[in-house]
Image (spheres, rainbow, N blue to C red):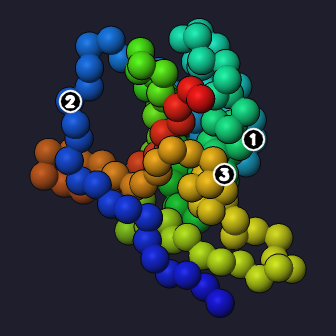
Amino acid sequence: MTDLAPLALATLDAPVPEDTRTYHLTAPADPATACLARRFVTLALHATGHPGLVDDACVCVSDLVANVVGHARVPDLGVEVSVFREGRAVVGVRDRDPGRLPWSRRPAVDEEGGRGLMLVRGLSHASGVSWVWDGLDLVGKEVWFELRDR
């Protein structure tokens, strides 16, 4: 049985507070990029004093990168980490394939894949998909998750 409900979609960006620190990575859409993304997120969270978020962030970013590599038809992807002073971080994985939305599903017990988005939802405080625009042109999507210090 599959659950074909899409992740929540958001189309408007909220203003970013001045005390937010944001880091960007662009890398090839290749399986090896998951390791690079984990290291990138780890360094950003340590640099901003949030080492307690590293483990969950690494699991989530690995799954989102794997989804881009496996399903989006793009040569590269972006990872963005925004860390807020009040103890939360938002990590997004961006690609330039707006036509293929991620779908959460319930895989069979013996299936090896298909659990990534369920895992992201279970580990994060919030998660969703945002459209990426260039002016009036839809150019991609970003799947994101938010983690908070406990």
Identified at 57% across, 55% down, the residue is 121
- In the picture, the quarter occupied by the C terminus is top right
Residue 146 position, x and y percent, is: 48, 39
Residue 47, quarter of the rendered image: top right
Q: Is residue 141 above or below residue 89?
A: below
Mark 3 / mark 1, whichever is N-terminal: 1
Q: Are marks 3 and 1 in contact (CB under 8 Å)?
A: no
- Give me the C-alpha separation between circle 3 and circle 1: 12 Å
Which amino acid, by three-letter code, is at mark 1?
Ala
Residue 73 position, x and y percent, is: 52, 61
Q: Are marks 2 and 1 in contact (CB under 8 Å)?
A: no
Q: Which residue is mark 2?
A: 15
Q: Is residue 21 above or below residue 60?
A: above
In this rendering, position of residue 3 left or right of residue 31: left
Q: Which residue is mark 3?
A: 63
Which amino acid, by three-letter code, is at mark 2?
Pro
In this rendering, position of residue 22 left or right of residue 108: left
Residue 83, quarter of the rendered image: top left
Which amino acid, by three-letter code, is at mark 3?
Asp
- Give me the C-alpha separation between circle 3 and circle 2: 27 Å
Instruction: Give the label on residue 32, or none.
Output: 1
Circle 3 or circle 2, nearest the eye: 2
Q: Is residue 112 above or below residue 41?
A: below
- Give me the C-alpha separation between circle 2 and circle 1: 33 Å
Q: Does residue 95 appear in this view? A: no
Secondary structure of residue under mark 1: loop
Secondary structure of residue under mark 2: loop
Mark 2 / mark 1, whichever is N-terminal: 2
Identified at 60% across, 60% down, the residue is 117
Q: Are marks 3 and 2 in contact (CB under 8 Å)?
A: no
Q: Does residue 35 appear in this view? A: yes
Mark 3 / mark 2, whichever is N-terminal: 2
